Image (spheres, grey):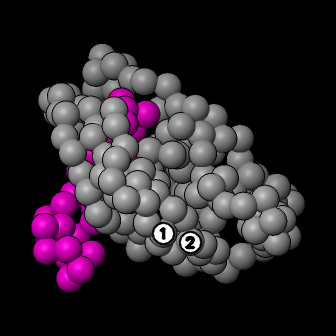
Amino acid sequence: MKLPIIAYGDPVLKRKATAIEPAEYPHIKQLCGDMFETMYAARGVGLAAPQIGLSMRLFVIDASVFDDEEPGLKDFKKVFINACIEEESGEEWSFNEGCLSIPDIREDVTRKSTIRMSYYDENWKHHDETFSGMAARIIQHEYDHIEGKLFTDRLSPLRKRMLEKRLTDISKGIVDVEYKMKFPAAKKGR
């Protein structure tokens, strides 16, 4: 089931998400499936639970679209539950990022090239893995969401001020998107 994506300005996107337990979410696989369906419908490569209004430490990614640039990403589709970045290392590199919650805005963001993460998958199996390159970047972007951060928080104060009107317009629903969204500051009856 496709879910509406929460737009910039909603407090859920700025809140640090809560860890979850298996007993609390017996239908976690269904939720993950809905998140993948929502992400694909919006042509994204990652989606975090806060982006669908759930303040929980869960995100999904599918980096296979970058297989041409990094052949190891051909089948790179994963679920991350209660993820924790244990270590960031390597060279910092910039890449033009976007976000489904902030449509029509893309900005260069600098991140470390390698991360080590501990997390659970959708079967509640624990993993401790190292990721690099584009996979690491996508994971870091989605991880920021469960930490209550957006890619715009990583921009310079000047750049953020330059984007302020566009961000306000997004929160009001003054943006053209091809997927269902919820806008926190949209006027009723629009």
Q: Which is more toward the observer, 97 or 26?
A: 97
The residue shown at (51%, 62%) is 110
First-in-chain label (2 vs 1): 1
- The residue most toward the front is 91
Q: Amino acid at mark 1?
A: Ser
Range of residues picked out in magenta? 57-85
Residue at x 27%, y 40% (from the top left corner) = 116
Q: Amino acid at mark 2?
A: Asp
In reply to whether residue 95 is colored magenta, the answer given is no
Please say if the residues under marks 2 and 1 sit with CB atoms less than 8 Å apart. Answer: yes
Q: Which residue is mark 2?
A: 108
Q: Is residue 80 magenta?
A: yes
Quote the CA–CA distance across marks 2 and 1. 6 Å
Q: Quadrant of the N terminus?
A: bottom left
* Image x and y of residue 144, in percent: 51, 46
Viewer can see residue 36: no
Secondary structure found at label 1: strand
Which residue is rendered at x = 21% and y = 57% of the image? 77
Residue 32 x/y as whole percent: 31, 46
Count of marks overlaid on the render: 2
Quarter holding the C terminus is bottom right
Residue 185 makes an appearance in the image: yes
In the picture of the structure, the residue carrying the numbered disc 1 is 94
Q: Is residue 175 above or below residue 160?
A: below
Structural crowding at the residue carrying mark 2, measured as other residues with C-alpha within 10 Å and reported as few (<14), some (14–19) or many (≥20) = some
Depth check, front residue: 150 or 24: 150
